[in-house]
Every structure is written in C-alpha cells, then in structure tokens.
Image (cartoon, helix red, strand yellow):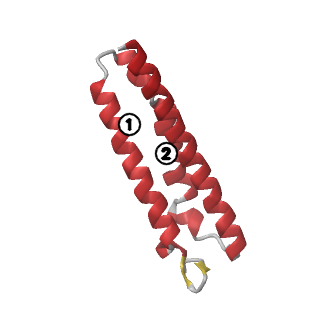
Amino acid sequence: MLAKAAGRPVQRHPRIAKIRSRVQEERRLIRELQNRLAIPRAKVLLGPAAHMLDDVEGFFLAEHTLQEPRSRAELVKWLDYAEQCLTAAVQQRKLYEKILKKVT
C-alpha cells in the first residue's frame, strides 16, 4: 500500500507531479543544448546536470522510496530536497549554457 500524506496516496501528490514535470522540461532543455553543440567534449559538461535529474527521478521520486512511511512534515522535507537537487541541475545547465555561448 502506498504511503499517504494529507489523506491521499503520495504518488498522486500534486507537488510530486510538478517536480516530475519540471524534471522532464529540464531534460528537454539539456537535450536541446547538447544538440546545438558541435564539440563532443562540450556535451560531457552537461553530464552532472543530467545525473542530478537522475537522482531526482531515481531516488527522491522513485516509487519504492515514496512508499516509505512518512509524516506530512517528513514528506515536505523530502520533496524540498528533491527540489533542491532539481534547482542545482537547472543552475548547472544555465552556467554551462552561459559559458558555451561565450566560446561558440
């Protein structure tokens, strides 16, 4: 049985859906940037940002992880960590995007 927060299954929590949507959008932006790069080595620079997104999806929002029992406060804190990781990925991509604009 799924863990519940605020009376609903955690998987259906609107904040989780929002984070997942943001992860997908960020993946799209990273792919677009990678596709614009002519230098293969430059594409590697975006690896850490992609790995952070993997952490958000594969660790923080993984079904088995979300099934663990948590209080409402614990879930809020857990999702805060997921969003912090997502924000770090966005910042990483923006930094490399800025750097690559200067050199290309």
Cβ atoms at labels 1 and 2 below 8 Å apart: yes
Mark sitting earlier along the chain (1/2): 1
Q: Is residue 75 visible?
A: yes
Residue 71 vs residue 89: left or right?
right
- Residue 84: image location, x then y, percent: 61, 49
Residue nearer the viewer, 65 or 4: 4
- Which quadrant of the rendered structure holds the C terminus? top left
> Which element is circle 2 on?
helix
Q: Residue 30 carries which label?
A: 1
Identify whether 103 is placed above or below 64.
Answer: above
Please report the residue visible at 47 percent of the width from the left and 34 percent of the height from the top: 93
Identify whether 2 is placed above or below 7.
Answer: above
Q: Can residue 45 be seen in this view?
A: no
Disc 1/disc 2 C-alpha distance (Å): 10 Å
Furthest residue to the bottom?
A: 7
- Residue 2: image location, x then y, percent: 55, 77
- Residue 61: image location, x then y, percent: 53, 60
Instruction: Please state which amino acid type lies under the numbered disc 2.
Output: Leu
- Label 1 crowding class (10 Å Cα cut-off): few <14, some 14-19, many 20+? many
Q: Mark 2 points at which residue?
A: 53
- Mark in the foreground, 1 or 2: 1
Residue nearer the viewer, 19 or 100: 100
- Residue 6: image location, x then y, percent: 61, 83
Instruction: Please state which amino acid type lies under the numbered disc 1.
Output: Ile
Please report the residue visible at 46 percent of the width from the left and 30 percent of the height from the top: 47
> Which element is circle 1 on?
helix
